[in-house]
Image (cartoon, rainbow, N blue to C red):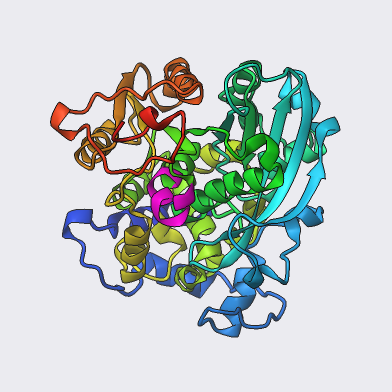
Amino acid sequence: MKSLRTIVLTVVAGCLLTTPLPAAAAPTDQGPSGPQQWIDNTIPAPRFPAAAPLPNASLTPRLSALWRAVQSTPAGDPIFDSRPGNLDGLHPGDIIAARDVTATSALLAVVPIRQALLLKFRTTDGNGKPSFGTATLVIPAAAWTGPGDRPVVVNAIPINSLGLRCTPGYAMAHGPHSKFSVGDLIPPTTWWGLSRGYAVLIPDHEGPLMAYADPNVAGHIVLDAIRAVRAQDPNRFSRSRFAIGGYSGGAIASYAAAMLQSEYAPELNGILVGVTTGGLVTDYRTIAHKFNGNMASGILLVVALAIAREHPELLAYLNHLGQWAATSPVKDTCGDSNGPLGVTGVPVQIASTVADPLNSPLAQQLFARFDLRGRTSGAPLYIYHAAWDIWIPEQDSRNLFTSQCARGVRAVSRTVPGEHAIGMFAGFIGATQWLDERLRGHPAPSECPARQATSTTPARPGDPTASARPGS
């Protein structure tokens, strides 16, 4: 009789051999391969508690139950767990609740702080439906001595997690805990911003479903967090300059906020004065194929589960093995676990009911929905990428720079030494210096060809940062 190791290797090898090349694949739901059929014939389906059908989703009762079973374990704190019943009556950015978390945030802030405030606000999910988000506003103890209202750095931390306790907001509200992620402190944007006298806004940009890598969820939450801060204390922040910084998973949020701002939050024209984005994924289709079946497969599998929470129709593609994995403790994993999950290099086919899930019609629809490259940034951009990033092509960042220049956005592009992780540190000083200049009202530089350096982005009357926006 074959050993378990032999069976597993046979399944993985069979799935790898049935993985079509992206260029040759047709966007059709092809039937399961032999190893996939063997998995469902051998592994029994997990059982879930009965659940009512989901609103706004055409799912069978079993898929509705599966959707509920793949959600993160509740955080145990209503501000993160409880969905308000009156979301339909609220506007994006309207504040639902606020809690002073100064005592638990002070240690993590390192720099002396006056106050840390956890905000819960209305936002919009990845399907255009009302949802809620959370973000933490940290105000340094030192008085602001610069011109105008105290500026705000929006720190889009690379959360990269599935568990509700893995967010920076939960850490700031509860202090270090068993799920605390060191990634909440890296890069040290919060410390840098507070030391410069800026307030720092830290959004939990994966949303209440922890929909890691959904750019629409992330962009909406970041923009609505800015709205919430301005509404919470208009005497201090109604005329503040805001700038967003993000790298890798955080770059998804900063980039999405820039791309969605003009259409989703047009009143922030001139308020959002700059956005940095480093190690950014812009082409989900290419990256999904690149990550599949190798050391990056753990990240791909985690992202697929996160996306299925926001888009539950994806759950129909999970075979029995995939359902067991998605409802296991993996659903509460934090960012530092994603890499080790890819050690086996298993492809997504091993968890799917179809031979080619990445080229299925549903996958193509989602790739198109996540593609924001056809939009125009609402603020100047600082784009940086590691020279030897083997996972995310630097060409994507170069293409972003070229396309945004063509659209009239003032943009800067930098190549920094190292691979993906090292690039975060290698690019930190340049990115924060650029943010510092934008927050202090200096005009944004542009490396775009002269004929592309003009934009029609409207200036806010009397805005002292008008020269820092496209078209200035």
Please state the horizontal and vertical placement of residue 307, each as a whole percent of the image: 49, 59
On screen, 273 above or below 356? above
| Residue at 66% over, 51% down | 332
Residue 437 or residue 277, whichever sits in front: 437
Closer to us: 297 or 116: 116
Q: Main secondary structure of the magenta part?
A: helix
Q: Quadrant of the C terminus?
A: top left
- Residue sitting at 55 percent across and 84 percent down? 60
- Which residue is at the front of the view, 75 or 30? 75
Which residue is pictured at 56% across the width and 35% down the height? 154
Instruction: Specify whether residue 51 is painted magenta.
Output: no
238 lies left or right of 269? right
Instruction: Left or right? Give the position of 164 relative to 9.
Output: right
Looking at the image, residue 173 sits to the left or right of residue 446; the answer is right
Q: Is residue 265 shown above or below 441?
A: below
* Residue 239 placement (x, y as % from top left): 57, 36
Occupied quadrant, residue 184: top right
Q: Which residues are magenta?
A: 257-267
* Residue 36 place in picture, x, y as percent: 41, 67
Residue 297 visible somewhere in the drawing: no
Q: Residue furthest front?
A: 462
Furthest-left residue in this view? 451
Q: Quadrant of residue 447?
A: top left
